[in-house]
Image (cartoon, rainbow, N blue to C red):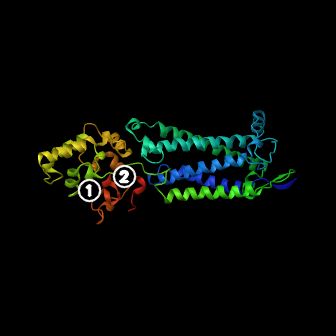
Amino acid sequence: MKKILVWALYTRASHVLLMVMMLAVFLTPEVKRLLTLHVALGYTLALLFLFRILWGFMDVKYSKFKDFNFNLIDLKDYMLAIFGNKKEYIGHNPASSYAIIAMIVLTFLAVGTGALAYGVKEGMGVFAFMNHTLFRDMKLFKEVHEFFSNALMAVIFAHIAGVLLDKIVHKSRALESMVDGYKLGDEEGLKLTLVQKIFGVLALGLSIFAFVYMLLAPNSLLIADGNLKMDYTKENRAFYKECISCHTLYPPFLLPSKSWVSMMDGLENHFGDDASLDAKTTESIKEFLVKNSAESSTKESSLRIMASLEKEKTYLAITETPFWKNRHKKIDKAVFKRADIGKPSNCKACHDNIENGLLNNRDIKSL
């Protein structure tokens, strides 16, 4: 037998890119400030697999789908011979054939459900219109997304374990072949046409471009913010004028209605100050706050605030809510005493757009 070229440079490069991005996409979802990166990675993975599908229908020796082995008997024999005399395959063996198809299908399912969850929970991306009261309490999209993501990771781990086991037990060149492209065999090696080479270059280039573009252009279709920027001077002039004259203009959706009612009914002792207003202005502001309180909002912050509250307790400050305390507990207390911040309630020190009703994770300024 001789060394023959089996995997084209495009196949190897896209494989490495997939591995790196797949690792990154599984490390980023729990870090809220990295959510945009997580989404951009997900869409790029889907694009890479889309190009892999097209590559599979091109006449590329060893990589085309019609060369995959989906024979169940062959799969059974291959799996049962893991520690014995296993048949060698120049291209994809039965196990890797099924693994690749599973990874493609699960990636599209994970990305699709992730896009739905991104729209429903965050009001972002192409499904931002689904950030609606109809879906406000639904966790289904996120749970389904996590199911497909975990299934994808299980398939990837099984695939990696199979390659490593093959290397250790059978001294296979499968691992090395994904670096140099060569395996041992008596067949004729791979030869790409000019069209196939151009496709490979364009596919990699477009995938990287799409990823970078999504990070540099946050208003692009797939990750655009669907939350409306509020102009409170138009929504309720009195609310804007009276509140912003003394402190940060806090959006109504950050507290429940009973908190706003209690606050507006006690303006004569408003956190130690007399903020009394005439009856008409007071009633106008109270009505506006109650109408737009956390109960009526579809924003994720509102849902989490409401879920964290003790029902019998009335919270008069956002910083008193369990959700706020939990979200900010890792911030050193000394930070809030800095001259440029002053106190924990100075939300706009970190949230530039809070006075326009926006609390997006990607807009948080580093302290």
Disc number for residue 248: 1
> Which class describes the residues within 10 Å of circle 1: few (<14), some (14-19), or many (20+)?
some
Earlier residue among tags 2 and 1: 1
Q: Is residue 162 left or right of residue 128?
A: right
Residue lying at 23% horizontally and 40% vertically, measured from the top left? 258
Q: Are marks 2 and 1 in contact (CB under 8 Å)?
A: no
How far from the left and from the top, in percent, is residue 305?
33, 44
> Which class describes the residues within 10 Å of circle 2: few (<14), some (14-19), or many (20+)?
many
How far from the left and from the top, in percent, is residue 50?
63, 47
CA distance separating discs 2 and 1? 14 Å
Give the vertical position of 178 relative to 321 (above or below). below
How far from the left and from the top, in percent, is residue 75?
75, 37
Total labels: the figure holds 2
Which residue is more in the foreground, 164 or 309? 309
Which residue is more in the foreground, 231 or 52? 231
Q: Quadrant of residue 351?
A: bottom left
Residue lying at 59% horizontally and 40% vertically, measured from the top left? 151
Answer whether residue 314 is visible to the viewer in this image.
Answer: no
Give the vertical position of 335 relative to 123 (above or below). below
- Secondary element at image label 2: loop
Disc number for residue 359: 2
Q: Amino acid at mark 2?
A: Leu
Residue lying at 16% horizontally and 46% vertically, measured from the top left? 282
Answer whether residue 237 is visible to the viewer in this image.
Answer: yes
Residue lying at 69% horizontally and 55% vertically, measured from the top left? 199
- For the C terminus, the image quarter is bottom left
- Secondary element at image label 1: loop
Which residue is more in the foreground, 158 or 363? 363
